[in-house]
Amino acid sequence: MPNCEGPDPNPVAPAFTPPPGTCDTHFHVFGPSDRFPYGANRKYTPPDSPLEDYFGLMEVLGIERGVVVHPNLHGPDNAVTLDAIARSDGRFLGVVKLEASGTFEELKHLDTLGVRGVRFAFNPQHGGTFDSELFDRTAGWCADLGWQIEIHSAPDDLVELAERLVRAEIPIVIDHMGRVDVSLGTDQEPFRVLLDLVRETHIWVKLTGADRITKTGAPYDDVVPFARELIAVAPDRMIWGTDWPHSAYFDPSKMPNDGVLMNLLPAFAPDSAVRDRILVDNAARLFGFT
């Protein structure tokens, strides 16, 4: 089983001043593996990126709140994610993985621990397929709890799912700008479908993963037109995140610097008022931060 690289240990400070209440809506915690073992069915093994390392990143970037998203690398056991929430002094909420055998009682208990959503991650990097029955069942439970569902898929899968997502009666969050292929331009079908989706008032997009979809590499200028179009359509339903610690990089030269990624925000949203909504207000409204 291959080992992937760890995050850049020297993030640069952002070139702008993040507003108070800045929220990273998408990060993961890996390990330590002697306490939180990695899942047996993982495709690769990451180095540990424990919570203490993320606290350090928060200091550098000016992040005050966060949403820890359970990583597929840890399999179905949400313990590492729940531990991060518990140790955050009220600064974190969470998004978990739910097995097909999951129950509403399980989700009600997780709600008391600070969980606010379920993630369906079935892009090629993670493997697996979309479970429509589990999605429909989970959506009903999430409606009762006031939660949201996150979708991490390949662009073509997003096109196929579009009608189902439109019919959902809960907030739906699309990870990593839909993982669109930026080399195909903004007129490609998956991106036009994504724009149509965010015209629905319950569908949100994470302005994350620029390093995942770029074709030119840092400073990721080829991603900017996509983010700007999304923001123009739904500025009140765009949220931001680091995606730290950036798993599945096997070439250290391609590992993104988190400060460089954050410095995309002024290019994505030149209007500071819009940028502040993306960093603070939208996340607070979606996840219920107070």
Image: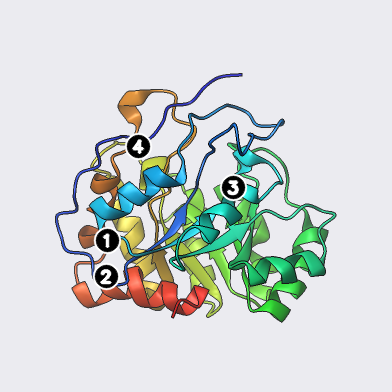
Q: Is residue 51 left or right of residue 278?
A: right
Q: Nearer the viewer, residue 245 or 89?
A: 89
Q: Position of residue 113 (x, y in %)?
A: 62, 66
Residue at x 41%, y 48% (from the top left corner): 209
Q: Earlier in the sequence, mark 3 or mark 4?
A: 3
Name the mark on residue 215: 4
Q: Is residue 133 left or right of residue 239?
A: right
User: Which of label 3 and label 2 is nearer to you?
Assistant: 3
Q: Earlier in the sequence, mark 4 or mark 2?
A: 4
Q: Are marks 4 and 2 in contact (CB under 8 Å)?
A: no
Residue at x 63%, y 40% (from the top left corner): 74
Look at label 1 and name its amino acid.
Answer: Phe
**Residue 75 shows in this picture:** yes
Name the mark on residue 268: 1
Look at label 2 and name its amino acid.
Answer: Arg
Name the mark on residue 275: 2
